[in-house]
Image (spheres, rainbow, N blue to C red):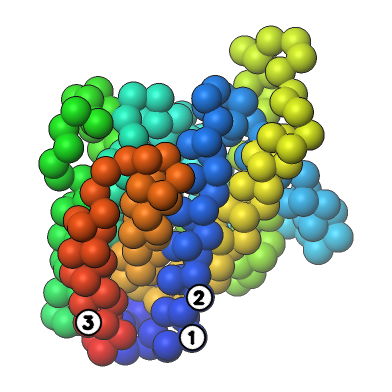
Amino acid sequence: MTLSVISISLGVIGVVLAAGLAHATWNAMAKSFSDQLVSFTLINVGVAVPSAAVVFFIGAPRRAAWAYLAAAVLCHLTYELFLMSAYRHGSLSRSYPIARGVAPVLATFGGVLIAHEHVSAVAVVGVALVVVGISLLATGNREATSRRAVLWALATGVAIATYTVIDGLGVRASHSALRYAVTLFSIQGSLFIAGALFRLPQGWWPQPRRAAVGVGAGAISLVGYGAVLWAQARAPLGVVSALRETGVLWAAVFGVVFFSERGGVKVVISGAVVLAGVAALALG
């Protein structure tokens, strides 16, 4: 399936930008937990339970998508493990932008080389501007981000780009973003929970209010990534990835406001660059 940047509507752009906000929101909720294994287990409860319920009623996607689903489950699990490690060793406003900044470039190359997509010169400029804006957030304030955190964040970015391409191909093969999404997350979430239960101590389930935060973060992530999958069937993978990663601006704001991290001025500068990139993608 060949897609052109010209096929992107303002509606698709708006949906993916909203998905970026949703992604930053659930990441901030996850970071608020001191124990990241508890955090991500609760998130997967919020992902797996509603997904399994929906699969029960609407069924799984077409057989052509199952090979992609199997690979995607592995990639998403790897991504979660890498992201947990990045958050253990680094701040939200640094680890998150590094991880998300790597993904659009790799996803763009993957879309061109593997999915045979055509991306215009203006769109390439747009992707580049988004990546530059994201990268600005990751520079400076070295004391907040260890070398180990940077390496984990970079590995997370590679995992993101990998599952972006796989999921893009899978959702197109399935011809149903909803069936693909809920099947993916019911399997992935269940496997993560099963593995986590072997490591979590007895009585690990937190107080109701904290549990609601974790499970709610999972529900938000499910809706946000479902929107991304819907968009991937209608636009080039690298462009969707770049638009989605504008969520790093929200993550930086959340880091400054809720976690007392530095960098308010840099957030404004980076935001201007990212918005210029989004404008280029819209005009592409």
Q: Nearer the viewer, residue 131 or 259?
A: 259
Residue 135 position in % (x across, y down)? 18, 52
- Reply above or below: 190 against 134: above
Which picture quadrant has residue 283? bottom left
Q: Which mark is residue 280?
A: 3
Identity of the residue furthest to the right in this view:
57
Q: Residue at x 34, y 24 (%)?
A: 89
Q: Are marks 3 and 1 in contact (CB under 8 Å)?
A: no
What quarter of the picture does the N terminus occupy?
A: bottom left
Residue 194 position in % (x across, y down)? 69, 24
Q: Residue at x 81, y 63 (%)?
A: 58
Crowd around label 3: few <14 · some 14–19 · many ≥20 (10 Å): many
User: Disc 3 and disc 1: Cα gap in Å?
Assistant: 16 Å
Which element carries disc 2, helix, strand or loop?
helix
Residue marked by disc 1: 11
User: Disc 2 and disc 3: Cα gap in Å?
Assistant: 17 Å
Q: Are marks 2 and 1 in contact (CB under 8 Å)?
A: yes
Q: Is residue 29 visible?
A: yes
At label 3, the amino acid type is Ala
Of the two numbered discs 3 and 1 on the same chain, state the one appearing first in sequence.
1
What quarter of the picture does the C terminus occupy?
A: bottom left
In the picture, measured across the screen, residue 256 lies left or right of residue 32, that is left
Residue marked by disc 2: 15
Which element carries disc 3, helix, strand or loop?
helix
Residue 255 position in % (x across, y down)? 38, 45
In the picture, measured across the screen, residue 165 lies left or right of residue 181, that is left
At label 2, the amino acid type is Val
